[in-house]
């Protein structure tokens, strides 16, 4: 991993020196080893840049603010992150001319919650060795298979294609497992409405309305969120029901429908471990089934199916028919 | 402080029979903002309107709620009433307590409760109403007719006669449509081509009419008075300005295997062809799919033959964009494919025909030159069985639930024509009912039975099989309660008619609605039968529902009258309920721009003062003269920046709140 980080830093340095960009948007050390945090680096501070198993954060959303500033910023994008940036560019939220996007390879990111669940306590540091993750803890060394610790989203990795980056850094990494990302959604669809309601009520009742999902989501990039706008009338509605969290999350899922790239950040940052990405995946699955495969951010020219119309579109009754089935 | 007046209409017993209007009045009086409430027998009557006007003056009302019928009926009436009383007409809301309430409920208690809730929602909305003013737009003095059959031709001729320019778009290489394929017409038995072709020639020669044949509508933008339509003129591979229609090329063409559409595929034509002798315009067209030159790069015989040098293999599709004030749908019909009804053996035996195929078989310009012979072996038939309602009035799901309307009469016509020309041929007709409501229609049918000796059997055919070169027909004779086993040489199926499949995509482009059977929906089934609910879109002919030729022509002329009425107007008053965007909330994401069907939204960089902070942002701007107030943008907008005047998000929320209270 160190070798790859060095390669990234070396290329970043070259780009800064060539004048392609004036600063780098990457990951800086966090409070703990498992929470590296987005940071902006000048050439002199590049040695502080982190790129390891825990640098999961999607940096695309930070480009909104960064691209408004003077000069060009070099942003490091993992393959899945690049779709988020491309989608934001498509929505005119990021000034693309102020961005230099460097696609960097990824072998899947780790989930500290999974490590804790497997008994890792008092962890002080980690290292990776031959497909294993070794945690140094207060109580000694714990070794776990890397595959068992992968983030949910990495278990259904969409591959190593990038969308709309300026260049990519070539580096050989082992393949990731490929699972059907709609498996869980399909299982929920099989349930009765009552069962599904119970499932979501159980999950969403854990919500503490910390807004982490909204704040991290690259698709949730409104100048002012409807939930923060008393004029919208939405905020008050969400508060007037005993089950306000469901309204918040369902409205949020609707708002990002057709624009969500399935980057999975919402579930990753949720402190209550709510599988929020399933709501978005349900929309993606429906869109794919009703309008043909669509990946937000993949094609800058493609009209998103939900704000497009073609005579071949299914009739509104399709919804009813699916409801009955 | 708003002062709202609520006026509850009885609509005779239409509302008052199911809704306790007195209780509605009592209940709404308690609502905040309501300064006056009253009920009246007919609020739309002069005295009802006077009640409203005097209440506005007496109580100084600032807004009005009328609890009555659908706003589609009388919203305009009450807006005018309000304006006459000095109120802004957009300070009027209608609570529909008839169609949405009294007509669909039986229990008075429940209906009254619901009427009160609907009134409350309207009061909540009117409290947030703001006065609005309308702009005006010009009307483009040109009409587009989509479809060049008898309906389209008649509409176009009438519009042109009134002095307006009109274009006809026809997907086939010639105008004429289905009527050109018919042999004789009921109930007078005059030759279809003889009465149609003069109109085709008129349409071709009229200086106000421009024909776009072998063309299709590519896209439609805009709104009533101001449509912008792009027409794709498909490449004929023949230059229209040079071709003389001599037909030399069509005779020389070595490719002869293509089914001739005009004769319902019962004979073949060349790859370069003129659909029929009286085609308008009489210009050859190359069917590239079957042309040897396009398939192999060789041949080119037509090019060498053509003395006018009209062949142009390199010709490309041409896109023409024009502006129109009105658009007429005249897309017509086709016959369903009866092979889905296995019992009739269509497609298994050549001697089982659809009536349109039979029509060609009887026609002098048809595949047999008008000689009635069995298509399988060319023998003279002795007995012909006609089966009616094949796929019509069929609720099994295989066919159409509606009556195709024309089949009873054309079947009687076929029977008479056969018996008249070939008295040795016997004719049996299986029917469910014989429907002949039209001028001289029943007399015609009676002639078939009484003068021409056609056997009419009430009952349906269960099976048609082939046996020893002939057909065996098994059907029930319901009046005599017996099964019939008949030998026949030909079986003719009166297959259901359905809207032409192109209607659906064109309707989508026009945002005009279609019903479950694919027919265009009228603005009102009785009172506005030739207008679509989409302003500026009119309906002509079978695209709206099954009709015979006289009805089609009558509707086509009615449609033209409506179009002329629109084109005569100097200016149209716009809808004042237009969208507007709050620049401080706008993300600049372009979602609204993409969904706007009218191209009313553009984006611009603007310097904003965002609560004291200066920033430049890309924001949406609505052109109010172009916006039609459909509201698509407000739904697409993720941040709620886009709002629709008269239907603001806040108003809709207030209505929902009032209902849920």
Image (cartoon, rainbow, N blue to C red):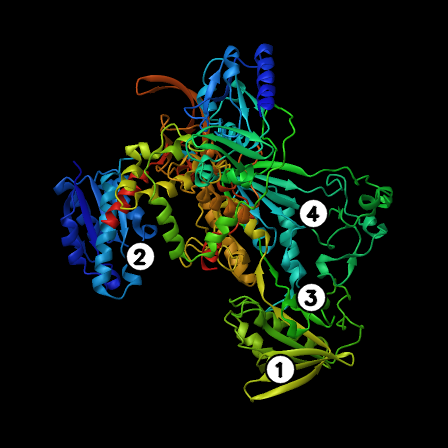
Going 78% across and 66% down the picture, which residue do you hit?
B368
Q: Looking at the image, is mark 2 or mark 3 earlier in the sequence?
A: 2
Labels 3, 4: front one: 3
Q: Can residue A273 be seen here?
A: yes
Q: Which residue is mark 2?
A: B100
Q: Looking at the image, is mark 1 or mark 3 earlier in the sequence?
A: 3
**Cα distance between the residues tagged 2 and 4:** 52 Å
On the picture, is B66 further left or further right than A127? left
Q: Which residue is mark 1?
A: B475
Secondary element type, mark 1: strand
Pinpoint residue B171: horizontal percent, then vertical percent: 64, 49
On the picture, is B135 further left or further right than B12? right
Verify CB contact (< 8 Å) between mark 2 and mark 3.
Answer: no
Verify CB contact (< 8 Å) between mark 1 and mark 2.
Answer: no
Q: Mark 1 Cα within 10 Å, few/some/many (few <14, many 20+)?
A: many
* Pointer 3 and pointer 4 on the same chain: yes
Labels 4, 1: front one: 1
Q: Mark 3 Cα within 10 Å, few/some/many (few <14, many 20+)?
A: many
Q: Looking at the image, is mark 4 or mark 1 earlier in the sequence?
A: 4
Q: Can residue B324 be seen here?
A: no
Q: Looking at the image, is mark 1 or mark 2 earlier in the sequence?
A: 2
Q: Looking at the image, is mark 2 or mark 4 earlier in the sequence?
A: 2
Pinpoint residue B15: horizontal percent, then vertical percent: 24, 60
Labels 2, 4: front one: 2
On the picture, is A20 further left or further right than B377? left
The image's mark for residue B357 is 3
Q: Which residue is mark 4?
A: B281
Please name whichever residue, B406 or B28, is drawn nearer the observer in this view of the structure: B28
The chain identifier of the residue carrying mark 3 reads B
Going 30% across and 51% down the picture, which residue do you hit?
B74
* Pointer 2 and pointer 3 on the same chain: yes
């Amino acid at each position: 991993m160190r070798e790859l980080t060095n390669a990234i830093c070396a290329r970043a340095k070259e780009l800064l020196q060539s004048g392609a960009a004036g600063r780098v948007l990457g990951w800086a050390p966090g409070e703990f080893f498992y929470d590296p945090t987005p940071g902006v680096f000048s050439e002199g501070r590049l040695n502080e840049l982190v790129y390891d198993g825990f640098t999961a954060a999607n940096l695309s959303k930070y480009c909104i603010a960064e691209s408004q500033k003077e000069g060009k910023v070099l942003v490091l994008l993992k393959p899945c992150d690049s779709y988020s940036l491309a989608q934001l560019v498509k929505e005119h939220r990021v000034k693309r001319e102020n961005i230099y996007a460097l696609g960097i390879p990824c072998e899947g990111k780790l989930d500290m919650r999974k490590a804790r669940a497997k008994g890792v306590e008092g962890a002080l540091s980690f290292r990776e060795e031959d497909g294993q993750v070794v945690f140094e803890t207060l109580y000694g060394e714990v070794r776990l298979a890397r595959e068992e610790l992968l983030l949910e989203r990495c278990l259904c990795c969409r591959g190593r294609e990038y969308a709309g980056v300026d260049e990519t850094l070539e580096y050989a990494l082992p393949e990731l497992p490929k699972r059907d990302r709609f498996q869980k959604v399909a299982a929920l669809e099989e349930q009765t409405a009552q069962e599904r309601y119970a499932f979501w009520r159980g999950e969403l009742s854990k919500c503490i309305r910390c807004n982490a999902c909204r704040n991290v989501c690259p698709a949730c990039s409104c100048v002012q969120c409807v939930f923060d706008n008393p004029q919208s009338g939405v905020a008050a509605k969400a508060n007037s029901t005993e089950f306000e969290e469901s309204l918040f999350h369902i409205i949020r899922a609707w708002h990002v429908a057709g624009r969500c790239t399935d980057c999975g950040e919402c579930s990753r940052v949720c402190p209550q471990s709510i599988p929020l990405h399933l709501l978005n995946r349900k929309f993606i699955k429906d869109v794919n089934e009703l309008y043909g495969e669509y990946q937000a951010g993949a094609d800058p020219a493609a009209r998103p199916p939900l704000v497009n119309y073609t005579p071949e579109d299914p009739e509104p009754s399709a919804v009813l028919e699916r409801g009955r089935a | 402080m708003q002062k709202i007046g609520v006026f509850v209409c009885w609509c005779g017993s239409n509302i008052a029979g199911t809704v306790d209007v007195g209780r509605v009045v009592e209940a709404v009086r308690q609502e905040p903002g309501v300064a006056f409430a009253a009920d009246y027998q007919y609020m739309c009557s002069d005295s009802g309107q006077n009640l409203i006007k005097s209440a506005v003056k007496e109580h100084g009302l600032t807004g009005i709620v009328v609890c009555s019928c659908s706003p589609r009926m009388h919203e305009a009436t009450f807006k005018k009433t309000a304006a006459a009383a000095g109120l802004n007409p957009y300070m009027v809301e209608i609570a529909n307590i008839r169609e949405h309430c009294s007509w669909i409920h039986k229990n008075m208690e429940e209906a009254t409760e619901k009427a009160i809730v609907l009134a409350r929602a309207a009061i909540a909305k009117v409290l947030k109403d703001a006065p609005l003013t309308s702009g005006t737009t010009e009307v483009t003095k040109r009409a587009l007719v989509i479809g060049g059959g008898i309906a389209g031709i008649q509409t176009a001729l009438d519009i042109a006669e009134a002095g307006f320019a009109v274009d006809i778009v026809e997907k086939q290489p010639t105008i004429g449509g289905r009527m050109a394929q018919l042999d004789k017409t009921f109930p007078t038995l005059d030759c279809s081509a003889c009465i149609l072709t003069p109109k085709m020639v008129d349409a071709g020669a009229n200086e106000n009419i421009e024909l776009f044949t072998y063309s299709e509508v590519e896209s439609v933008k805009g709104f009533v008075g101001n449509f912008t339509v792009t027409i794709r003129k498909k490449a004929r591979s023949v230059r229209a300005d040079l071709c003389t229609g001599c037909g030399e090329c069509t005779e020389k063409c070595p490719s002869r295997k293509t089914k001739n559409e005009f004769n319902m595929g019962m004979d073949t034509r060349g790859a370069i062809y003129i659909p029929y002798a009286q085609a308008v315009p009489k210009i050859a067209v190359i069917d590239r799919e079957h042309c040897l030159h396009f398939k192999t790069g060789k041949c080119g015989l037509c090019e060498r033959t053509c003395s006018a040098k009209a062949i142009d293999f390199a010709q490309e599709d041409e896109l023409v964009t024009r502006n129109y004030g009105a658009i007429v749908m005249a897309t017509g019909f086709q016959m369903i494919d009866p092979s889905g009804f296995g019992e009739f053996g269509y497609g298994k035996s050549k001697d089982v025909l659809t009536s349109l195929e039979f029509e060609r078989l009887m026609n002098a310009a048809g595949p047999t030159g008008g000689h009635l012979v069995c298509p399988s072996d060319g023998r003279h038939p002795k007995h012909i069985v006609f089966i009616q309602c094949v796929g019509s009035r069929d609720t099994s799901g295989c066919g159409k639930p509606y009556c195709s309307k024309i089949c009873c009469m054309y079947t009687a016509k076929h029977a008479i024509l056969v018996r008249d020309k070939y008295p040795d041929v016997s004719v049996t007709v299986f029917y469910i009912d014989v429907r002949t409501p039209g001028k001289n229609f029943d007399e015609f049918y009676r002639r078939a039975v009484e003068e021409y000796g056609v056997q009419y059997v009430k009952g349906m055919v269960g099976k048609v099989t082939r046996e020893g070169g002939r057909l065996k027909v098994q059907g029930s004779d319901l009046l005599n309660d017996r099964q019939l086993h008949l030998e026949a040489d030909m079986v003719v199926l009166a297959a259901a008619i359905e809207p032409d499949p192109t209607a659906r995509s064109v309707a989508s482009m026009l945002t005009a609605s279609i019903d479950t059977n694919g027919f265009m929906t009228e603005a009102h089934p009785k009172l506005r039968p030739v207008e679509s609910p989409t302003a500026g879109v009119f309906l002509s002919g079978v695209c709206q529902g099954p009709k015979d030729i006289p009805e089609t022509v009558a509707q086509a002329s009615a449609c033209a009258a409506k179009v002329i009425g629109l084109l005569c107007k100097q200016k149209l008053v716009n809808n004042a309920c237009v969208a507007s965007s709050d620049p401080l909330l706008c993300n600049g994401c372009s979602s609204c721009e993409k969904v706007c069907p009218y191209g009313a939204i553009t984006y611009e960089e603007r310097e904003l003062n965002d609560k004291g902070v200066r920033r430049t942002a890309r924001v949406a701007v609505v052109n109010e003269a172009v916006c039609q107030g459909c509201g698509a943008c407000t739904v697409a907008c993720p941040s709620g920046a886009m709002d629709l005047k008269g239907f603001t998000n806040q108003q809709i929320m207030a209505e929902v709140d009032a209902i849920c209270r």
